[in-house]
Amino acid sequence: MTFEQKSFSKKPFVKKDGAKKEFSKKPNFSRNGDFKRKSFKKGDEEKTERFSKEKRPFKSRYDNKNKTREESKFKAHDEHVEFVRRKGFSAFQLRLVNSILEDVLVMHNSLDRAYAYWFNKVKIDPVEQGFLIKQINFMFSRLSLFAFVANLKRPSDFERHVGRLTFSFCAYRDWPLPELEGEEGFDRRGLKKRIAQAKDEPMYNDGCPLWLQELGASELKGKWDEERHALGQEAKRFIRTNTLKGTRDELAHALSEEGVVTKSVAGVPTALEVTSNSALFRTKAFKEGRFEQQDAGSQQIGSFVEAKPGERVIDACAGSGGKTLQLAASMEGKGVIIAMDTEQWKLDDLKKRAKRAGAFNIEPRVIDSTKVIKRMYETADRVLIDAPCSGTGVIRRMPDSKWRDGREHLNDIRNTQKDILNRYSKMAKVGGIVVYSTCSIMPSENEDQIATFLKENEGKFELIEDKHIMPSSGFDGFYMAKLKRLA
């Protein structure tokens, strides 16, 4: 049986049950579906009859190109700021922001995962994406403040009243307030009073949960208040110059030609601070592997290792390789770096980054058993152990993480650190160097671990030096200790 070819530009499709197919009317959400032609089996007379009838014309959902959002045309961050000051979040932006909040607060996904999902699903300009991320990060950095303003007291309140958080955030910013559906019982008249009260309370104003306050005060004593305040501030953007492909000044010049404004960081020779709201990962300089995004404090760990050309270096907890790539540049591509991790997918990501960076002296090696470590005993000139930790030094880069009580896993983390330091340090040759580092600012994960290790390995290792980088310095918080193997 043959079918007469028909045009599908006249009448809408009809489902098998006779209902007309409704097309989504949600505006501006990009759709990436793969629309394929339907094939019909021969002999299906019912479908043949339907498609042989006269069809009414319909307009494709993609035909209306004139309905564009005003804010989608903006090419600069400041334009978005000025827009929301005058008009508030657009309906599109408000829906997207609330969807991301619900993904984290209701579905209990991480903020990074929510960003990855929604910005893959909803295609918007990188400048607008960066603007929205900045606002959402601030909301999570002060989540307790906005919860107080929104009168949310229990976790279940967050799940049922996400819109109140956005409403309270807009009130805090003094932006036009969005509509609140189904929130007739919410007291809007007391907003300004509650905002003023929250600003006068350091715990709210610094965005510090109770568990972190108790832990920080217990471990850091009188130093904690300053560090708590620093952790509540917006994180700065830093990049590391890939010296395999040029100098810091050459990189700064290349980025300036692409509209990226940077400034040198004193005391960190490879670091640039990015002071403009630019889409870094779309630049030609990034695609050529001329830089990596890395905090200036983290870059100091790579320098602290002092890896030299021709040496055999082990990065024992390499992850996706941020510090591995820095070590490769320090070694000028000479010698060998064994990059080790328990997760194969992280090492696969490292391979891609190394290729882009032109770092060809890296050998990824997955740790799938204790034998992998034992085979490496006494083989390395230098071993970097960037140990798993609580992440309290980098908490402002993961603002959603601090609202989960980190104390419940802290003992397990400390035990893991102790085990890794004891076993992995044996990969250094006698006379070799072991560097232990964390992105925590808590002494129990840092100098206390080193003191215990030296006591249990008396005569086998000695401490050469250690160093703290605190959030109050403007960088993220880190600890590093350099040990020398004696026997």
Image: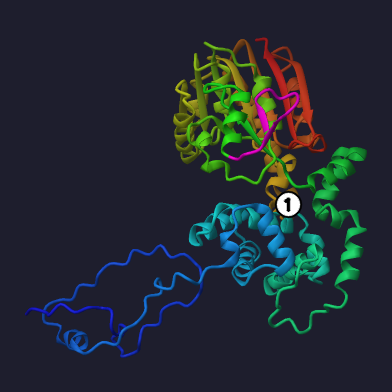
Q: Is residue 456 magenta?
A: no
Residue under label 1, please give it.
Answer: 402
- Taking 42 as reference, is 195 left or right? right
Residue drawn at point x = 67 percent, y = 31 percent: 272
Helix, strand or loop: magenta stretch = loop
Q: Residue at x 75, y 48 (%)?
A: 407
- Estimate the x, y position of residue 90 in percent, counting from the top left: 64, 69
Residue 114 appears at what percent x and percent y?
58, 58
Q: What is the span of residues highlighted in magenta in the rendered image?
A: 259-272
Q: Quadrant of the N terminus?
A: bottom left
Residue 266 shown in magenta: yes
Vertical position of residue 360 compared to residue 191: above or below: above
The location of residue 12, given as percent across then percent down, is: 32, 84
Task: Place residue 221 in its image quadrant.
Answer: top right
On the rendered structure, is 345 left or right of 183? left
- Given residues 87 and 296, the one toward you in this image is 87
- Quadrant of the frame with the C terminus: top right
Q: Can see residue 366?
A: no
Depicted 243 relative to depicted 135: above or below: above
Q: Residue at x 55, y 35 (%)?
A: 319
